[in-house]
Amino acid sequence: MPINENSTFVELPWLDKASIALPHYIYSTGVPSELTAFVVLIVLATSIVIFGAYATVQQPKNAIDANEDKASELYDITDRDGCNLFLGSADSAKNVDLDMISYKTALAFPVLAASALYGLDYLIRKLDVSKIKLLNYYVVFSSFGSSFVSYNIFTASAARNLGYWLGLKGNSSALIKRYRLTLSEDHELPLGSYERIDPKAMGMSKKKLEEFEEFMWERNHAQLLRLPKIKSRDQLTALVFDSRLLYLILASVATATTYYLYNPQLQENYDLPSMNWLLNNTIATLLAMGGLAFFRIGNIKVASVLLIALFAYDIYFVFKSTLMISVATGIDLPVKIVFPRAPASLLNFKQIGDMSYQQLALPASMLGLGDIVIPGTFASLCLRFDYHLFYTNNKLPFHKLRSIGVPKYFTAAIVAYVAALMATMTAVQIYDCGQPALLYIVPAMIGAVALTAVVNGQFRELWDYKEDMKKYEPEKLKHKRVKADEGDKDVKMTVVTSETLYEFGDVTDESDDTFIIDESTDADDDSDESDLEAEISHLLQDQEIDVERISDLSD
């Protein structure tokens, strides 16, 4: 049966029924109706930022490798997942940190965003972009990728913590099995498929298996072919996955399919004026999580430049132009989180049963994903800086289950973010018009984090903090070595002789090494000279500096 805005409540699919009934229930809880929508948006946005920030935590450079501490109850096989310190291919080794946001990218970001905004505004006015299926199909495919990333993060975290709370050995390893599929060259086995042959697979004891193998050879001249060890040089590539893979794919497909089926622009028989707000928020949350996982900034300077640039962009396109508001309200895509405003009167299921969708539809308050993802990247960087400080002060192996206490910089960023969102919502109420959220968010977050650093005497450390990895450039390294070698030519070793006491001083080393040669070694002066030369030779091997050979030690 076709669904449209004239369809009654009972005729709507269950997801649309839930989206209509839920606001009536929430607004009946007693919370002031003018605050409810804003509180829901703030809680949802803050939850995305917090969970997304912890999803970006990885082993800091100054922490001990988790694999050095496998015996710990905190150890989990997921400790190294997603860490860019472990390079798994020649391409990643040669091109480190290509996913890091640079100064140029940060400055170009507002320009690219403005270009996209003008383009979408043109399409809205000329072509009615809400009917352009290409954008919606793009979101369908994007929702699959974002769902996979988000579900992977959530289930790994849940399994890790559940295993720890239950005291299971290996934590998540007790619940999730990990496998490696290897493509390698082989020089031993005949063509065919092979499985492991051992007592467990054969259902025999070790002794029985030996008897079985002997019998097969003596009676049939048949051999049991066991899988040989694969040499590293024969392995071409490998795929490491775990037992969640199939379920993650199915869940992601289900999410993308639901978005497709409940999309008015993609379904002819589903012609509602706008997308279901529950589904919109679900897809928007998954897209935001995917954005936080991949949109990484490696130092506080670049993060500050990006926030300030978008601060100016947001102010201009809200106060000086109507583009942003017209695009945000003109495109029915999950690029914002929304919540219905209070209905004129609260209704129960019996009352809304015979009412049409058009009668029950409510206007909504919204918050753009840019106001979540951009501040979220800054908060994520602050959290990783907290981890850096913890492992600087505590030389411990990194474990995702290890608590670092209250992360002060991350806490400051989150408190500032919530306060800024509250200020934004208050301004919306007072002025009764859309507000650029970054106008309040950027100064609040940068100011709060900077103030925290000043109070703790760590501003310089925060300002200089970098996660970037240096790219291997042999020509630059060769140039540095040449300059170092030229400087070493001027380094001399001075030999001061006074009977049998010899002091060797390296001008590049403040230490003072003294060597005493026993006079009774040999009565002969030539022998003394030989002994001294031997001592100098041994010293040179340790010092690795140039020395002028002393050819004559006596007058």
Image: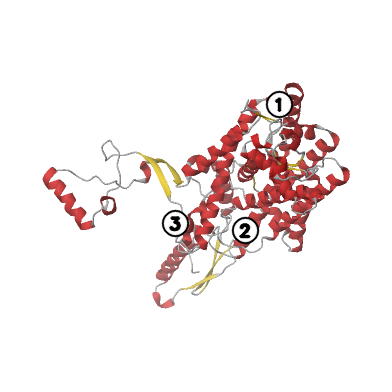
Residues 468 and 416: in front is 416
Q: Which mark is residue 129?
A: 1
The residue carrying mark 3 is: 174
Q: Quadrant of residue 195?
A: top left
Tell which circle, 1 or 3, labels the residue nearer the N-terminal end: 1
What kind of element bears circle 3?
helix
Residue for badge 2: 387
State the residue at coordinates (23%, 57%). 205
Left or right: 39 in relation to 252: right
The residue lying at 41 percent from left, 78 percent from top is 520
- Label 2–label 3 contact, CB within 8 A: no
Depth check, mark 2 against mark 3: the one in front is: 3
x and y percent of residue 245 in the render? 47, 44
Asked whether the viewer can see residue 56, the reply is no
1 or 2: mark nearer the eye: 1
Figure check: 333 above or below 21: above
Q: Residue at x 53, y 61 (%)?
A: 397
Residue 213 appears anywhere in the view: yes
